[in-house]
Amino acid sequence: MSALTLHNSLNSYLLVGALLFGMGVYGLLTRRTLIGMLIAAEMILVGASLNFMAFNRFSAPDPATGQIFALFIMAIAAAEAAIGLSIVIAIYRHYRSIDAQDVVNLKG
């Protein structure tokens, strides 16, 4: 397969989406800081969104379906980033650290 036809293959998009999703899961499990975990969660959402768009382009009868899912994912990612960063700021003000091990002592 030549490099010029890679953009016209569903497998190429699915591979990139799976790599982004896998890197996000790996980052979520291995990061110690809360900011790194938020970035990894964003990568998971980007990988899922890319897969929706790829399936939309190659196999959906209605071209708007995958785009609507991608827009919902973008809205969820924006809300997650805003709420997550506000929680990280609140934790930093209380503990003076954003290390995830320091947050284990939270009591509700």
Image: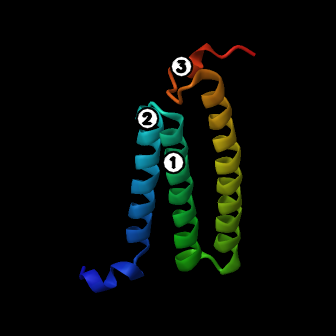
Residue at image point 48% right, 38% down: 28
Does residue 47 appear to the left or right of 75 in the view shown?
Answer: left
The x, y position of residue 13, in whole percent, is 43, 69
Label 2 – label 3 distance at C-alpha: 13 Å
Residue at image point 52% right, 65% down: 50
Q: Which residue is mark 3?
A: 102
Label 3 – label 1 distance at C-alpha: 19 Å
Q: Quadrant of the C terminus?
A: top right
> The disc labelled 1 sits on which kind of residue?
Ile
Of the residues under marks 1 and 2, which one precedes in the sequence?
Answer: 2
The x, y position of residue 67, in whole percent, is 66, 73
Q: Residues within 10 Å of mark 2 (few under 14, many from 20)?
A: some
Q: Quadrant of the N terminus?
A: bottom left
Residue at image point 43% right, 41% down: 27
Under circle 2, the secondary element is: loop
Residue 38, above or below 19: above
> The disc labelled 3 sits on which kind of residue?
Asp
Q: Which residue is mark 2?
A: 31
Image-quadrant location for residue 8: bottom left
The x, y position of residue 4, in whole percent, is 29, 86
Residue 55, above or below 104: below
Image-quadrant location for residue 52: bottom right
Q: Which residue is mark 1?
A: 39
Front position in the image: 23 or 11: 23
Cβ atoms at labels 1 and 2 below 8 Å apart = yes
